[in-house]
Amino acid sequence: MSVTEQQAGPRSTWTVTRPSAGPRHLAWTGSYLAWAALADGLSALAAGSLAGQIRFGGYATMPRGYLLLTLALPAVWCVTMLLAGGYDIRFVGLGSEEFRRVLNAAASVAAIVVAVSYAGHLNLSRAYVGIAMPVATALDLAARYRLRKRLHARRGRGACSRRVIAVGHPAAVRQLVATLRRDTYHGLAVVAACLASGTDADPVARESAARESAARDSAVGVPVAGGVADIAGVVERYRADTVAVLACQEMDSGCLRELAWALEKTGTGLCVAPTLLDIAGPRTSIRAVAGLPLLYVEHPQLVVGKQLLKSAFDKVFAACALLVLAPLFAAVAIAIKSDDRGPVLFRQVRVGRDGTLFTLYKFRSMRVGADRCKQELACRNEASGVLFKLRSDPRVTRTGTWLRRWSLDELPQLVNVLIGDMSLVGPRPALPEETERYCDLMRRRLAVKPGMTGLWQVSGRSDLPSEESLRLDTRYVENWSFALDLQILWKTCSAVLGGAGAY
């Protein structure tokens, strides 16, 4: 059956020629959710069995009531996970959202068990509940993490991704294509673009623009399949399951509403990018005012109380790490000293919070006097912007090579964290000559303390262009939260072990 929807006037014409068949990505998401449900059930069963083993010595000596509870726990766990949104396809592969739903489900199951025990005067063993609930949560989080990593690996090979049609102006589409190609784990692959321009209403101009599509293809990185009026047809032609509308004046509220109606008939998803970049998470919320959905943006969470919590955590962690790593510090110092008899530590002035200067400490990984050779190597600089980076820097010593490979040269910065000059997580500590060339946007990164690690390190380290590194630093400042710090610290471990971008 063909359904034609035509908007009055020349603004757009959308034709839907395919009946509703539901989202095309259900094949692989169904398989993923089935594995997730299996992992949830097995985690709950294993946790209940372990709790029974510890509390009662095994199934043979376990009271019948606890045996039934152990067998019923997987079903209760999975149903609660369903109600908590743990199987929502919108959040498949999104670690923080997926994990939060697992934690919400775990809290709900614990509350249900306690409430039923109290209401039914069951007098459940606190040891059994105290073992089963945390173990089930930990096992389920680990299983979900493993599933997510497996999904990311498959997406890196081009599978399990949503086919996206990007709508917007060439510069915005080009940026979106570059970002999604770099971060394949998001599972969004732009297969074509519909470019917005003032020629969309003129058929003659549109025909002329079509003849220039080859040049535009190379400009945005994907085939340019039409304009704003051609979106529905392009979706059908490229078998897309998502349309991403970037900020452009051609797509006003009326256009978006009618496009949503047209895409609804095919089960095609629609997402709209706001004009505010790099602001997400708890800072944004959509509230209806007089029937209008308004996007509210809160100020960054840089209040004194939360900064004190961050500072206290940094100092406690740094003090404990210095005590634990003292033998490693001694071994690294001996290796550096035996290499060329030079000093063990490298000191350099860096720019901290609000532009204050401090002395940064690192294990020396270059030969003595390496700074004086920097000007001679300037013509070989492989970084763009204000940064200076060489993949094979002749100034790096033999010991410095493996120190940089495993980021061991950064460990003395724990002293900077302990005395309050730096944080565990934050923007990269910049040199004074770098900050002198900062624009107003770049200076935003000086609103917080620099960090030993940050979004720049877990996203590629030295392999990132300097502009991208600075953008990630700004994004961190705009979206800071204590949970984000913990997430970055966790990801730093895999980034260091992987060694990508370490030179």
Image: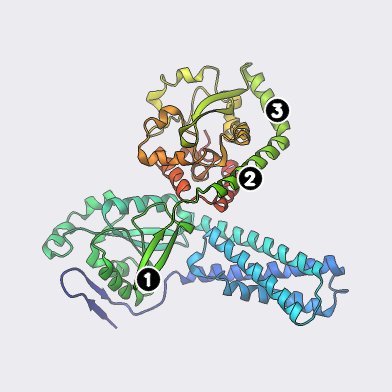
Of labels 3 and 2, the one closer to you: 2
Residue under pointer 1: 268
User: On the picture, is 297 further left or further right than 62?
Assistant: left
Q: CA distance from mark 3 to mark 2?
A: 27 Å
Asked where in the image residue 243 lies, by quadrant, the reply is bottom left
User: Which numbered dot is residue 331?
Assistant: 3
Three-letter code, disc 2: Phe
Q: Let me know if residue 455 appears in the view.
A: yes
Asked where in the image residue 48 lies, by quadrant, the reply is bottom right
x and y, in percent, of residue 202 in the image: 13, 64
x and y, in percent, of residue 143 in the image: 64, 61
The answer to which of marks 1 and 3 sits earlier in the sequence is: 1
Q: CA distance from mark 1 to mark 3?
A: 58 Å
Give the crowd class for mark 1: few <14, some 14-19, many >=20 residues within 10 Å: many
Which residue does the image show at 43% across and 63% down from the upper left?
A: 285
Residue under pointer 2: 313
Element at badge 3?
A: helix
Give the crowd class for mark 3: few <14, some 14-19, many >=20 residues within 10 Å: few
Asked where in the image residue 319 lies, by quadrant, the reply is top right
User: On the picture, is 73 further left or further right than 204?
Assistant: right
Element at badge 1?
A: loop
Q: Let me know if residue 221 appears in the view.
A: no
x and y, in percent, of residue 284 in the image: 44, 59
Which residue does the image show at 76% across and 77% down from the upper left?
A: 117
